Structure formats: structure tokens, C-alpha cells
Amino acid sequence: MERNPGCEFDLSWISNVNINSNAINKSVESIIADKILKNEYEAAWLLKAVTCIDLTTLGGDDTESNVARLCQKAAQPIHTDILEGLGFKEDDIRTAAVCVYPSRVKEAVNVLKKIGLYGKINVASVATGFPSGQMPLKSRLEEIRFAVEEGATEIDIVINRTLVLTGKWEELYQEIKEMKEACGQQVHMKSILAVGELDTFKNIYKASLVAMMAGSDFIKTSTGKESVNATLPFGLVMCRAIKDYQETLGYKVGLKPAGGIRTSKDAINWFILVKEVLGKDWLNSELFRFGASGLLGDIESSLYSFVFGRKAPSYVFTMG
């Protein structure tokens, strides 16, 4: 698949945007309504969801040991007994990536190299003054370069929300473009919009387009630190921006909802939304990711119930 190279900034593309909030909310209700999956189909979708997870630890108390546990869980995200019950081997399913702070990238790289999965499980690093983005641009770019030098294969940048709220769209474009250049040719860049802080659906749509014009490989809803994070209405607006961009320029850009996605039902609803708006091509880790820390445990519990016909004991699923 050809990656999004971006394009020249086009103010006219975002100047005449009108979005009806009530229509967005009703559209989401219509898309999700009455979509009930049979158990075997639900299990298949949940396994697919696991392969699209960026398994994340972004705590102030992160240590080398919990980064190591995160990587081990990414390598074997579902208990062997459950996979066998579903007809899979233990190395058939792994998460798409682990996501950590720049200072923890080297630790994640070392663990994944040790178990032979570096390059098969991506190492994503947040950067650019995560979560606020309120640092000088020079510092934000240096943070990207540091994470890449440490071995990150994906960078999750945060945009400067102030530029959105003040309508400085070309400046936003230039910042994101410089961030993409700092990532280099081999590293994929996800642009976190922090949609809960952008005030309007119109701003979310415009920020999505500008991030794609600047060369983003993915657009991502949230840092997970905002008071409002990944909601389906926000996701619909972003999906429509992705679709408009693809129909206009021919390039496919990925979507990563993050923050507040905790249950199997949440994951399936996001799949339904993406399939209905963007199509089946987006239902894989090249174009769709979940940013999550707690989602995997709920999926594993749901799969346990499907395989064994009873609720999983609370002690079964731990990170270590």
C-alpha cells in the first residue's frame, strides 16, 4: 500500500466546511443500531481487534520491568488455552504495537529483540510534548528524533491545539510537516488531534484534513488524558475526513481511536463504524489501531466465556 505523501496546504479545502452536529449523532445511532453479531462472528472480530491494538503504558510510574511485561503481553496477548479452543496457536495472534514514552523506547526494543519480535511488533512512541504539546517546536522535533534513534518504528505526535482554536491552519500544517520530516522515511507517524479539546466537529474535520495534507500516516483521536476522548461521533467526523481525502487524492490514511475504549462492545462498535464509512480495506492494523491499556483484558475475558461457556475468574488475566 502506498503511504500518504501529503500535499501542498490548501486553505480552500477547509474554508467552506459545515457540519450538522445533530446529523452526526443520528448517523452514528443509525450505523450502530441493531448490529448484533453471532457469538462465533463476535469472537472473530475480537481476535481481529487484538491484532489492531497498540498496547500502551504511559504512566509517570513506568519502569523497565513493566515495559518488559507490556512487551511480553503484546507477544502473547491471549491465553494459550483460549487460542487452542479457537483453533489458533499461541504465536498466531499478537498486538500491532506497544506504545511508550521516548525514554522507554530502548527498553521495549531490547525486550522485543530478545524474543525475536522486533519488527513484527512495532514500537510506538508518543512525542512532541505529550500530552499537551505545549513545548517549543525545536524541543518537540528533538523528541521525535531521539525516539527514532532509540528504535521507535512509529511516532504518535500531538498537535498544537492552540493553532486549531485560533484558526492558524497553515502554521499547524507546517508544524506537522516538520514533524513528519523528523520521523524520516521509514517511521510511520500518527497525529493525535486531542478531539475533546477542539470544541467543534468542524474543527475536528479541519484538523483531520490538515494533518493528512501534512503527511500523517494515521490520525488519532486522543491522548487518553483529556476529559473527553474517543467517541463514535468524533470518529465519524474523522472517518469522513479520511474518506474525502482518499477520494480526492487517492491515498489511504489510517484511524486510531484512543482513550476510553475499554470493552469488547466498544471495539466492535468501532469496527462497525469504520467498515460502514470507510470499507473493509480499513479493517486491519495497517489502517486501523486501538490505543488502549485496559481493552485487551476485557477482550480476553469475553473470549474465555465464548470458549469455556463460563465467566473467567478474576485472577486469570494479568499483565505479568
Image (cartoon, rainbow, N blue to C red):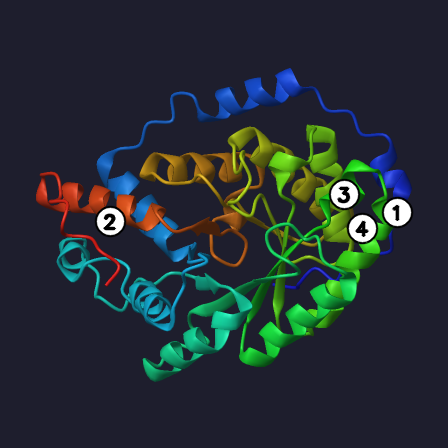
Q: CA distance from mark 3 to mark 1?
A: 20 Å
Q: CA distance from mark 4 to mark 1?
A: 12 Å
Q: CA distance from mark 2 to mark 3?
A: 39 Å
Of the image marks 2 and 1, the number of the one nearer the N terminus: 1
Q: Secondary structure at mark 4?
A: helix
Residue 162: which numbered mark, if any? 3
Mark 2 vs mark 1: give the one in front: 2
* CA neighbours of label 1 inside 10 A, class few (<14), some (14 to 19), many (20+): some
Any part of residue 180 in sight: no
Q: Amino acid at mark 4?
A: Leu
Quadrant position of residue 201: top right
- Identify the residue at horizontal 46%, vertical 58% (top origin): 60
Residue 10: which numbered mark, if any? 1
Circle 3/circle 1 CB separation < 8 Å: no
Residue 111 spot, x, y in % from top left:
36, 78
- Identify the residue at horizontal 80%, vertical 44% (top origin): 163
Q: CA distance from mark 2 to mark 1?
A: 45 Å
Report the front residue among 278 and 209. 209
